[in-house]
Amino acid sequence: MQTDLVKLFIESEALNQSLHLLAKFAPLWVPFILFSVFYRLWLVYVRAKAIHKSGSVLLEIRIPKEVTKSPAAMEMVFTSLHQKAGSTYHDTFLNGKIRPWFSFELVSIEGKVRFFVWTWPKFKNLLEAQIYAQYPTIEITEVKDDYTKKFEMTSGKYSLFGVQFQSSNEHVFPIKTYIDYGMDKDPKEEFKIEPMSPILEYLGSMRKGQNAMYQIIIQAHRKLSFLDDGYFKWGSFINSEKPDWKELAKAQITKIREEGKVALDEDAETQMKVIHLTKGQTDKITAIERSLDKNPFECVVRGIYICESEKFDGNNISGLLGSFNQYNSNNLNGFKIGFTTDFDYPYLSDPFGTRLVKLKRKILDAYKRRSYFQSPYKYWKSKPFILNTEELATIFHFPGKVVETPSFERISSKKSEAPANLPI
């Protein structure tokens, strides 16, 4: 019976006509597919070559006992890093020129809390100059041995749990920022509400053989254009650009205002309407409008808890997952758990445990490479979300004395003034 149905399908007139049309118009669609594939592969190749040539540098930032500035100072640093890197066709297709990205990292090595920034060597002077300009008493040193090198997932020496966070709402809605905590008013240390305290306390709670680290990778946001490898996709000639973040934000404001319109006269042919917004709707519009004045970045946030296998404590996973909860707003946006190195039903998804081992190796390798916006881990396991400079300065800045984590080492005083000849 099944054989007869298959034979009938093969001999059907509709199938024959479809195959005939595909063959007839092959000169039109085959070149398009081949060009699209070649275009992507070529960009991956030239960009990988350019990235390898550019190299990288890891900077450690040591903080003094007295930090009196609010996160607004760090916001100025992030603003200076909004590098869109406009490219010509020659630079893009032949030289592999891309937008730069930066990785800001909060790390605990056996309870010792440290701050790192990863960047390309050509941005080292810019980054140092901007940080020194805002925090003249800190120390910035180039790290020769990357702290991630000692960690591996091949010998069984280490056990790991990893997570990638994502936004809990549409990207146009901001998270709770330092302004919402009143830190823009520079209150005295005893009155400060430091949003980074939970993260630093968690990092400081690590014991010997235990390590935890957060990685915030950022890249200046821009529209998808002809110069991006995501341009040539099915239907891209009809809708070739992803909307700009600011356009989406303005559209969301319009949508909220439309929801607030109420009819004054139900019987009139032409209804007169007035905007009547609730406090929640007003707060949303205010928050979005404040965000529109800030530079947006595409971001991913990773967290990794990695320990010597015999020192692994599963209770510390909840701390890794919950350290960003203080930035969440029920009415606006926040962080939620996206991808994790775990399965809800491992006996179905990974009965032999091989997939889990592979995932753990990949997230550690992605962390080491600081890879997310380009191959080999481009948009791996999650899509980027938008954080503006105010939001970034909230989740990564240099705290004052209000943070009293014992293992958070501070320098007693700066060893020397910032170099006077740093280029800006």
Image (tube, helix red, strand yellow):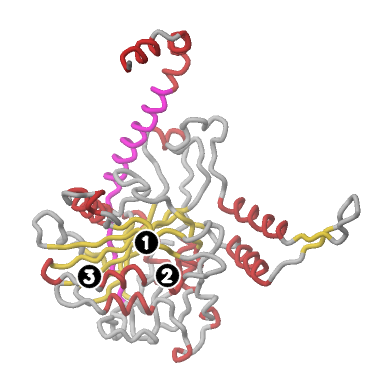
Q: Residue at x 65, y 55 (%)?
A: 250
| Contact check, label 2 and label 1, Cβ < 8 Å | yes
| Contact check, label 2 and label 3, Cβ < 8 Å | no
Tag 3 secondary structure? loop
Q: Residue at x 24, y 54 (%)?
A: 346
Span highlighted in magenta in the image: 33-62
Tag 2 secondary structure? helix
Quarter of the rendering containing residue 378: top left
259, 328: nearer the viewer: 259
Q: Which residue, given by chain and number where applicable, does mark 3 sit on? A: 314
Q: Which residue, given by chain and number where applicable, does mark 1 sit on? A: 216
Mark with earlier residue (3, 1): 1
In the displayed structure, does residue 284 sit left or right of residue 269?
A: left
Q: Residue at x 23, y 65 (%)?
A: 143
Quadrant location of the C terminus in the rendered image? bottom left
Asked if residue 29 is positioned above or below residue 126 in the image, the reply reads: above
In the displayed structure, does residue 163 sit left or right of residue 157?
A: right
Quick one: label 1, few (<14), some, or many (20+) residues within 10 Å? some
Give the residue type that dot 3 points to.
Answer: Gly
